[in-house]
Amino acid sequence: MFLRLAAQYQDLVKDLVLTLEALAEGLKDQGVAASCYSCGADGSHGASFVADMNDGHAVRFLVTGLGITWVEMRNGVELVKLEGAEAIQELDRLSCHLRTLQSSEAVEA
């Protein structure tokens, strides 16, 4: 059972890395400074995602074999730190916000 859970977690890490890479590209398309650096040839060891959300506000999402973390900062001061499922929910919230922005721009065009 534990080996199966470990394999499922590794698959989750890979999926999150792909999502982070796509999110970084989507944010760049919106003019937001964002980056995603993955570890391992296929992202299987994790990734670091950072986005500058303006006015000194930044978010960082880390996913590794050891855990998942979401950190929001303003002017270098940590405001919010979430881990595990809560961190993934914040990533989803940011992704939904991006899709909303893209939809409203498509309507305006």
Image (cartoon, grey):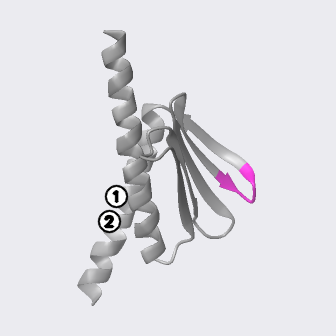
**What label does residue 99 carry, if any?**
2
Magenta-highlighted residues? 73-77
26 up-or-down from 41: above or below: below
Q: Are marks 2 and 1 in contact (CB under 8 Å)?
A: yes
Q: Position of residue 68 (x, y in %)?
A: 51, 35
Quadrant location of the N terminus in the rendered image: top left
Q: Position of residue 45 (x, y in %)?
A: 50, 38
How many discs mark residues in the rendered view? 2
Left or right of 19, for residue 31: right
Q: Farthest residue to the bottom: give it.
A: 109
- Regarding mark 1 in the picture, which secondary structure is present there? helix
Quadrant location of the C terminus in the rendered image: bottom left
Left or right of 33, for residue 28: left
Q: Residues within 10 Å of mark 1 (few under 14, many from 20)?
A: few
Magenta highlight: main SS: strand
Q: Position of residue 27 (x, y in %)?
A: 45, 68
Q: Farthest residue to the front: give it.
A: 41
Q: Farthest residue to the left: give it.
A: 107
Residue assigned mark 1: 96
16 up-or-down from 100: above or below: above
Question: In front here: 25 or 76?
Answer: 25
Q: Residue at x 43, y 53 (%)?
A: 20
Question: In front here: 95 or 29?
Answer: 29
Is 102 covered by the magenta stretch? no
Q: Residue at x 38, y 62 (%)?
A: 97
Q: In the rendered structure, which amino acid carries the disc numbered 1?
A: Cys
- Regarding mark 2 in the picture, which secondary structure is present there? helix
Q: In the rendered structure, which amino acid carries the disc numbered 2?
A: Arg
